[in-house]
Image: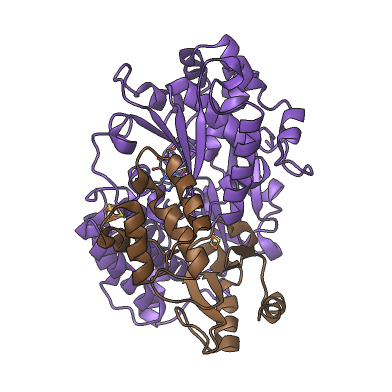
Chain colours: A brown, B purple
Amino acid sequence: MISDATRARINELFERYPDRRSAMIPLLLLLQEERGWLSPETMREAGEVLDLPPVRIYEVATFYTMLRTRPCGKYLLQVCRNLSCSLVGGEGVLRHIEKRLGIHDGQTTPDGCFTLMTVECLGSCGTGPVVQVNGDYHENLDVAKLDKLLDSLT
Amino acid sequence: MEERVLTRNIGRPGSETLKAYRDSGGYTALSRALKEMSPEDVAERVTRSGLRGRGGAGFPTGKKWSFIPKGTGKQIYLCVNADESEPGTFKDRLLIEKDPHMVVEGTALAAYAIGCRRAYIYIRGEFVHGARVLEGALREARAAGFLGRDVLGSGVDIEIHVHRGAGAYICGEETALIESLEGKRGHPRLKPPFPAVVGLYGCPTVVNNVETLACVPHIIERGPEWFASLGPPNNGGTKLFSVSGHVSRPGVYEVRMGTPLRALLDEQCGGVAGGRRLKAVIPGGSSVPVLTADDIDVALDFESVAAKGSMLGSGGVIVMDERTCMVKAGAVVARFYAHESCGQCTPCREGTPWMERVLWRIERGEGQSGDLELLLSMCVNIFGRCLCPLGDAAAMPVRSYIQRFRDEFEYHIRERRCLAAGGFS
Ligand SMILES: Cc1cc2nc3c(=O)[nH]c(=O)nc-3n(C[C@H](O)[C@H](O)[C@H](O)COP(=O)(O)O)c2cc1C
Ligand code: SF4
Ligand code: FES
């Protein structure tokens, strides 16, 4: 069920565009923020709100890497593996996370705390290696900083 | 060399606020333009300034605006490209987070010049903080009367909205951006028709990069001649360079167009990190051909970089020192394009992952004789045969790595190991 508060935010979104379909991505981001991921049920509801068949929602949800059609851990760790980060230690950062959490790209820890994802350039190449944790960027990482960061997340 | 125009407020506390922006003379260009200039005057000044698009292609901005057909009775749209997803590029993020009002004022001026009443800033979804800062700036600007209905009593309406993307490099391409903004997958459209004629919602549309529009208030304020004089002919202004990789002081640097790459690297960025020797530099984001250490006396303007067989692109400068394995660099870059291909065209959809596989195979020491010819023929089969430039953007760098570092690729295949070591950690 979409709450009244969410509905109000959705209506605000609709006002921005001459065509309500344009609210697709902002709407899906909003629902994902509230529910953690886009379940088939959520996509059906989004379709109702946008007055579109569910397949239109599904094809968008599967196209964009930030939209998740599977459940995700409490903390999503997105590790940049593009060139600039790789040149300054990005691979070591990824290896360390894999070792410490015992998971690989796309996996979630059994306790549901962390999901690990490798991503392409986050637009923060001058302060690499970079890991995005949920919405926040953590930059200039090394193993010590990474351990401190992971310790702070539970 | 260093010339702080776009970055003049950056580093000051509270630089993202309306107050700070106004204290430095912000929004005077918009007020003046609305009072004293016709839309055509604004566009004409931008044309004379020699401003060229900072999103990658370097298309003259005033000329792009002039393609908007007059008198069609349709709405006209402006999309600000804040997708910033070209690997190695992080300059627009700086402007957005630290001086969002400059972006807003530039957008409002461009909207006025082309007759647009509603503009969208398409910002990549990962920039959660940047989107918040922009929303805040828009609220402040609306409250102060710089946006909305009847801006500053001029009778002109200008509204600007932030629109967040959700992770797809291809949405930086202008027609994919438009599709995405319409709520669809980011599949590039066949051109023509160009967005200037059939763009957002089928209406005439201009797509401009953040940095391009950030130049506009300065052009209006200080004059097109001043702006043009900052760089070589047809390369007006300063340019932001995002410098990353093996360099002592990575970061965003603003220099005059035409500054030598060597001066940027040595004088501004403190040279190669650890005093090592330079091996290669990508001057304009990962889509452009790589330069060798011998090429770095090149002047950083569109024509000079092209004359060296590369492109100024987005100004994303990626520095690689002597230890860097160019096979691996090529494989990492190819992986990116394989990942980001939207899948509409066969050469790009099939070719980019194949290129990636062959490069990793060579990198692992499992390369076969004939692999380089195979890779080069793939580049030929992708280049120029796709719907959008992503295919070219994948082929060009790979070809350049092989052409310029062929010995290294051959050594890898022959000896089944790497000549270099330690560049990646
Ligand atoms: C695959 C691809 C990705 C692109 N990504 C971006 C981008 O992230 N930001 C950007 O401003 N332009 C990007 N562009 C260029 C845009 O298509 C367009 O040319 C640009 O936004 C025009 O603005 P300008 O004339 O102000 O440079 C990209 C182009 C391609 C082909
Ligand atoms: S070249 Fe690649 S990214 Fe561009 S439209 Fe074709 S398949 Fe999509
Ligand atoms: S390469 Fe990692 S943020 Fe750009």
**Which image quarter is the N terminus of chain B in?**
top right
Residue B277 in sight from this viewpoint:
yes
| Of the pair B162 and B268, the residue shown nearer to us | B162
Q: Is residue A23 left or right of residue B376?
A: right
Examine the rendered structure and indicate whether residue A82 appears above or below residue B19.
below
Residue B22: image location, x then y, percent:
73, 29
Examine the rendered structure and indicate whether residue A18 appears above or below residue B218.
below
Query: Which residue is found at the position 61% from the left and 19% from the top?
Result: B152
Examine the rendered structure and indicate whether residue A37 appears above or below residue A126.
below
**Which image quarter is the C terminus of chain B in?**
bottom right
Residue A70: image location, x then y, percent:
40, 75
Query: Which residue is found at the position 60% from the left and 83% from the top?
Result: A96
Q: How many marks?
A: 0
Q: Residue furthest front?
A: A4
Q: Toward which corner of the image does residue B191 lie, by quadrant?
A: top left
| Of the pair B7 and B372, the residue shown nearer to us | B7
| Of the pair A27 and B195, the residue shown nearer to us | A27
Query: Which residue is found at the position 41% from the left and 76% from the top?
Result: B363
Q: Residue furthest top?
A: B36
Residue B266: image location, x then y, percent:
68, 50
Residue B186 in sight from this viewpoint:
no
Q: Is residue B332 left or right of residue B265?
A: left
Q: Residue furthest right?
A: B13
Q: Quadrant of ligand 2?
A: bottom left
Examine the rendered structure and indicate whether residue B204 appears above or below residue A116.
above
Residue A108: image location, x then y, percent:
49, 83
